[in-house]
Image (cartoon, rainbow, N blue to C red):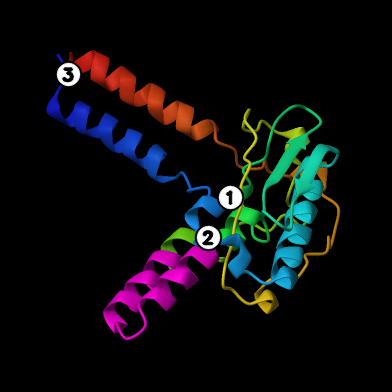
Amino acid sequence: MPTLATVALALVAASSLVSAQRKVYTNEDLASVDAIDIGTRNAWCQGQRNVCTRLCDNAVTNDCSTSTLDYDCQCSNGTAPGLEYYRSSMPSFICNAVFEECIIANVGNARGQQQCEDDRDAACDPDELLDAFTENTSTAAEAPAATTSPTASATSVADASQTEDPEPTAEADDDDSFAAPTAAPVVGAAALAIAVFAYLV
């Protein structure tokens, strides 16, 4: 019979795996793609393509539509990198735009705007996101990745000056590389939660 401490420890482990997941923001999270000026959309798509190229090394699909902000990034090994974990990717641009809309919607409400800013910092703080163009980044083609491809559309009222096109600064050194984040922890968390539930029943 499991002790209360054992059950509590298992539940904490499962919740930490689930909480480590980052929401993938899409155009459906925004008010309107057309509200974002074409220059910003162009910069976002260029950033998205650059990140996909860097993470996949040899992407078989690397598309981004400036009219809809739909995107698709597939590596040659059939996987899709966890783009939501990287700066200058479409999910990171959309994340910031969602909270800009929240701030604008709360004009005259200081508490509401502060909540939007706090939520933005928690959801898409650039200090928490990885840079696909650092020396320690490996390509997703060299590491396990999500088996499904995110397709997203987006809009934002964010200024295009916030989105500079990333330029690769150095090639990865295979000896000190790390794997690109993927959606794999979700499966682990779900399996752990099912196991704990089955054990208790």
Q: Nearer the viewer, residue 201 or 12?
A: 201
Q: Nearer the viewer, residue 191 or 147?
A: 147
Sequence-earlier tag: 3 or 1: 3
- Disc 1 packing (10 Å; few <14; some 14–19; many ≥20): many
Name the residue that disc number 3 marks.
2
Q: Is residue 175 left or right of residue 201?
A: right
Give the residues drawn in magenta, as a range. 96-120
Residue under numbered circle 1: 84
Amino acid type, label 3: Pro
Image depth: mark 2 or mark 3 in front:
2
Local crowd size for mark 3, using a 10 Å CA cut-off: few (<14), some (14–19), many (≥20):
few
Distance CA(mark 2)–CA(mark 3): 41 Å
Above or below, 176 against 135 in this view is above
Which residue carries the number 2 mark?
Answer: 95
Q: Quarter-wise, where is residue 86 in the image? A: bottom right
Q: What's the amino acid at mark 1?
A: Glu
Q: Secondary structure at mark 1?
A: helix
Disc 2 to disc 3: CB gap under 8 Å: no
Q: Viewed as shown, does residue 184 lie left or right of 104?
A: right
Circles 2 and 1: CB atoms closer than 8 Å:
yes
Residue 5 placement (x, y as % from top left)? 17, 31
Task: Please name the residue shown 19% across and 17% down the image.
Answer: 200
**CB under 8 Å between discs 3 and 1:** no
User: Which amino acid type is shown beneath numbered disc 2?
Assistant: Cys
The percent position of residue 148, horizontal first and vertical second, equals: 62, 30
**Disc 2 and disc 1: Cα gap in Å?**
9 Å
Residue 118 can be seen, yes or no? yes
Q: Position of residue 175 (x, y in %)?
A: 79, 42
SS at mark 2 in the image = helix
